[in-house]
Every structure is written in C-alpha cells, then in structure tokens.
Image (cartoon, rainbow, N blue to C red):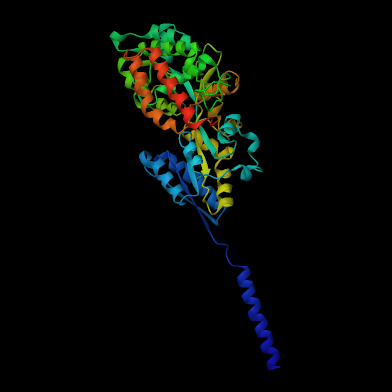
Amino acid sequence: MKKFLAILLAIAMLATLFAGCGAKEEEKVTVTMVESLTSPERTATIQSIIDKYEAANPNVHIELISPPLENADAKISQMLMNGEADIVEVRDQTVSQYVNNEWLEDLDPYIADWEDLDTLSGDSWTCMHQLNGKCWLIPSGFYQRCLYYREDVLAEAGVAVPTTWQELLEASQALTDAGSNFYGYSFRGGTSGYQYADTVIWSYIGVDILADPNAGYYLKDGNGATIFTLPETKEALEYHKELFKASPTDSVAWAFSEMVEGFIGGTTAFLIQDAEVIANCQVDMEEGTWNTAPFPIGPAGEAVFPNGFGGWGMAAACENKEAAADFLMFLSNPENNTLYAANHAMVPIHTNASEYSDAFAKGYFACYSEMAAEPEVYRHATQPQMYVAFATYKTEVDAMYQKYLLDEITVDELLKWLDDFWVQAYADEGQLW
C-alpha cells in the first residue's frame, strides 16, 4: 500500500509539473517604433492607436520613441544601422537611403492577405512600391497640394477662383497692389523652392513624356536626356518668373513658414501648399475668408505635383517580424488611418475614409475628393531621388533659381545648369528607375 501511495504521489507531482509547463504565460514581445515628424499632438494620436492595439494584444508591447524633430531622421538612420529599431517612419525623402542601405524589409509577403488591401488607393499602392517594385512601407497619409485662396478678397474684386496656371497668374497680377503691400501669390523662392518650379514644368509638359513619374527629370526613351532641353520647359520657367513678379520681393527667400504666414497674415491672395495648412488656416483665419480649390491645370491639360508622403517600414533587422507586421496593418487600417489623417490634415490612404470621417467628403478637404475623381488630370511626379547626386542637387539648386529670379543669370543659363547636372548624374550612376 505504501509503495502504491508513493507511485500515486509521484504521478500527481508529475501531472502538476506538466500542467504548470502548459499554463506558462507566453513571453511578452516588445516592438520598438521610431517616429520622424515628431510633435506632441501627433505622438499622442499614435500612442492612442498603440494603446488600442496593446489592449487587444496583451503579449505585445509597442515602445514608441519620439526623437526631437530636427535630428529624428539621423536618429532613425543610426538605430537602423545598429539594428536597434523594429518599425521606423519612412518618408519620401528618406526611403531611397534606407532601401539602398538594405535597412528595410520587403512587406509584400506580410500584406498579401491583409483584409484592408482592397481599399488602398492607387496613390498608396504606387508609393508603397515605388522602388524596385517591392513594398518598403505602408503610407500614413499624403501631403498633396491644393490651391488656397482668399474668398473675401476675390469676391470683393470680382475675380473668379483660378483653375489653370494661366488664370492664377492673371488673377495674381490683377490683385497685386504693391503700394498697399498686398500681392497676388505666396511665392516660394527659398528652401525647396525648386519643387514649385518643377510642378509648373510638369504641368506644361505632362507626365506621359517622362521616363518614369519617380524620375521626373528624364525623358522617356531618352537614354539620359532630360526635360530641361524642351521648349515647353523654358516657357514654364518664364511663366514661373512672371508669377514671382506678382509676389512680395522678399519671397525670393521664402520657405514654408514665410509663404504660409504671407497668406494667413493677409499679405497674399493665393497660396499653394499641402493639406496640413488647412489646420493653420482654421485656427488663424475667420470662417468665410478663405477656402481651398484643386491644383492649377497646365497647358498639357494636367495638374502635376509630388505626392509627398510619410509612412511606416519594418527594419530588416527586426527580430519579431510577424508582430511588427501585424501592428503595421492595425495602425494602417481604414479606421485608424482615417483618425490619424483627420487629426493631422493629411489625405488618407484608403478610398473608404469618408465612411469613418465626413471631413474627407466635404468642406476644405472636398478639393481632394474632386482631384481624386479625375486621375487622368490630377497626376503625380517627383524628382529622381533614387540618385546619390540628388543629395548634392538639393544643396545647390535653390540658389540657381534665386539667381534666375533676380536676373543674375538667364533662363538659358539656368536650363543648361539643370541639364548638365542630370546628364552627368545619369552618366555616373546609370538608369536607376
């Protein structure tokens, strides 16, 4: 009997041991996420989505790191290099660097069965696959441009809302009164001012002539030939200078803050900017004094502008890829993405965003719905950022445009400089699109 009881006790102890092993709590996974365009309000929105995810997935912890805005991209690069990040914010200005350094994971295998894949917009899919045909990120939203106008000023002057570049110039000239320090247009001649010249050029020549929308300085089948040899490009740059003459003289050095302040502060009647400025206008301008309209259409019958974006990518060195991918799809689903886009004045990535917020169906965002309904007219192109030479170009090109605007060089001299630069880039690096 004693031996029998001892055997039963041993069996019970073993059963308890195995039961304990089976009930062992699953180890908690930590996913490190680093944002770039940091602000307190934006961080709070992202954290609220993280909180929802963690509540539904208690075995996953998303650690959000929010470096200061001015050095966030450098911090992300360092963390990617050292294998210290799992999810990072990827922007149109950094995606080439991260991909070229093999720091990002191709997301296509992870999103293949994503239940929200069908509602992604065409712009979203294009941005996701713009390099090498692989998915390096899921966008968080788009910085698409539109025309802001002073509704009260136009009404008083009897000027119609412009729909084309030519109408914008004529309206800006008609409204300019330098003696009263009022001008038609908020020109951007300072940092990144070249991007505004590019939009005019593309609207003059059209997208179909380009080698690739993501290599917007090269001609199709041109073997490295650039758009800067076209007569339409010269005409566009001459137009660009006329628009500058309908703007404050010091706008030759205006960057984002100055051009927005020129419009909000009552110095100019028109502004072309991204959707994020809607929030600024709502805070600082009276209802009924301003509004938004679609981007101006050029002589080619198209309105062409960069589809600026930010988004989220997975680090190639991420050790918990399944958990990271699952959170990325949760962060990017229609409900959460619409919340993010509405809070931070971006164009959402899903076509059904209006089901989650009426902000994208009417009001100041309505112009974006109008443009989305005519994709053959409102099109996107961007600079050839895949080239290493682009980093040098950004440091030199604005000064060349300023010299042209101030009559220090001719339009032909500017065009020669632009053409020489990108012909040389092609000769050095080859075809990269």
Position of 257 with respect to 161 (left or right) is: left
Hey, which residue is sitting farthest left in the picture? 179
Q: In the rendered view, would you say 379 is above or below 352?
A: above
Q: How many marks?
A: 0
Toward which corner of the image does residue 244 lie, by quadrant?
top left
Left/right of residue 398 with respect to residue 50 in the rendered view: left
Q: Residue furthest bottom?
A: 1
**Left or right position of 277 against 112:** left
User: Measured along the vertical axis of the image, is residue 187 above or below residue 131?
Assistant: above
- The residue lying toward the viewer, choosing from 180 and 406, is 406
Residue at x 61%, y 68% (from the top left corner): 23
> Residue 364: percent from the left, percent from the top?
49, 23
Q: Decide: is 414 above or below 125.
A: above
The image shows residue 110 at horizontal and vertical percentages of 62, 45
Can the viewer see residue 94? yes
Query: Viewer-proximal residue, 143 or 407?
Result: 407
Q: Nearer the viewer, residue 310 or 237?
A: 237
Quadrant where the N terminus is found in the figure: bottom right
Q: Residue 343 placed where, x, y %?
A: 47, 35
Of all residues, the one furthest to the front in this rendering is 427
Q: Quadrant of residue 279?
A: top left
Looking at the picture, tell me which residue is in the foreground, 186 or 389.
Answer: 389
Q: Position of residue 271 (x, y in %)?
A: 41, 19
Instruction: Quadrant for the C terminus, please.
Output: top right
Residue 267 appears anywhere in the view: no
